[in-house]
Image: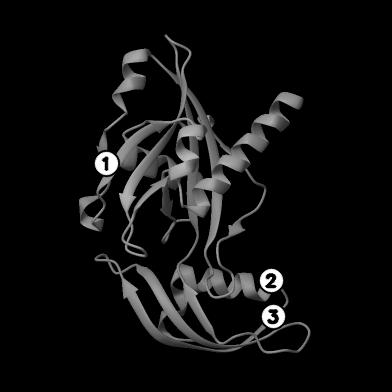
Amino acid sequence: MPQNEFDRKIRNWVNDVSKAGCTIHNVKMIDEIRKKNGDLLFALLDVDVRSPEGTHLPNIAFIRGHACLAVILLKNRDSGEQKYLMIRQRRIGNGQLSLEFPAGMLDEESDARAVIIREVREETGLEVSPTEIFPLTDNLLYSSAGASDEGIYYFGCIKELPGQEFCSFAGKKGGNPEENEDISVVLLSKYEAEPVCNSLQARLGFFLFEEYLKNYSAG
């Protein structure tokens, strides 16, 4: 194992791969990116991993760590209007403005619920309590397990607000300037959002949230 073996993200990846029945014979650090406080942000590893079936897995692993996302439906207490609380920000992967739900990386933390509450506050200004957040899945959903370890915790939230507060979120600015985040908050219906949404995570968020509502109403 490399010198960085005690970083939580690498440790979690080792644990997950081992729990799946694979055997890790060697891990070599190709490169790493750390935050200003020294915490590991990303790592690129050259690994020797053998499956339970005896085959070698591809040798490159991109370590991001896990993330969390919240699908938030706001209800206008005065008018009865319902809109999803979403954000727009430009993404380095394609240079485009991306319509998304509030989300964030767990980094060195393990409490996904606490992280998503903080991310929602930072990105949108909305305060939500732990009891208002509910899981949309029983397990992590992996975004690209062919090369990356990232799994995403999907949460939902339904929050009713007075009319004036409800409307105040449209056009609000958010994000962490130290992380080069320039975020605009928008209130949209699913009908309005889907035609301009190219984020797979956001599309899946809509699906999981609607499935939750169906199961909740059926129960």
Q: Residues within 10 Å of mark 3 (few under 14, many from 20)?
A: many
Res. 112 in view: no
Q: CA distance from mark 1 to mark 3?
A: 42 Å
- At x 70%, y 30%, the residue is 214
The disc at residue 22 is 3
User: Can you say whether 37 is above or below 47 in the image?
Assistant: above
Quick check: 70 left or right of 134?
Answer: left
Question: Residue 66's x, y, as percent?
Answer: 50, 60
The residue positioned 69% from the left and 80% from the top of the image is 22
- As drawn, the residue found furthest toward the front would be 195
**SS type, badge 3:** loop
Residue topped by disc 1: 174
Asked if labels 1 and 2 touch by Cβ distance under 8 angstroms, the answer is no
> What amino acid does circle 1 point to?
Gly
Query: Which residue lies most toward the left here?
Result: 177
Q: Nearer the viewer, mark 2 or mark 1?
A: 1
Determine the residue positioned at 36% across, 78% down: 32
- Which residue is nearer to you in this view: 137 or 106? 137
Quadrant where the C terminus is found in the figure:
top right
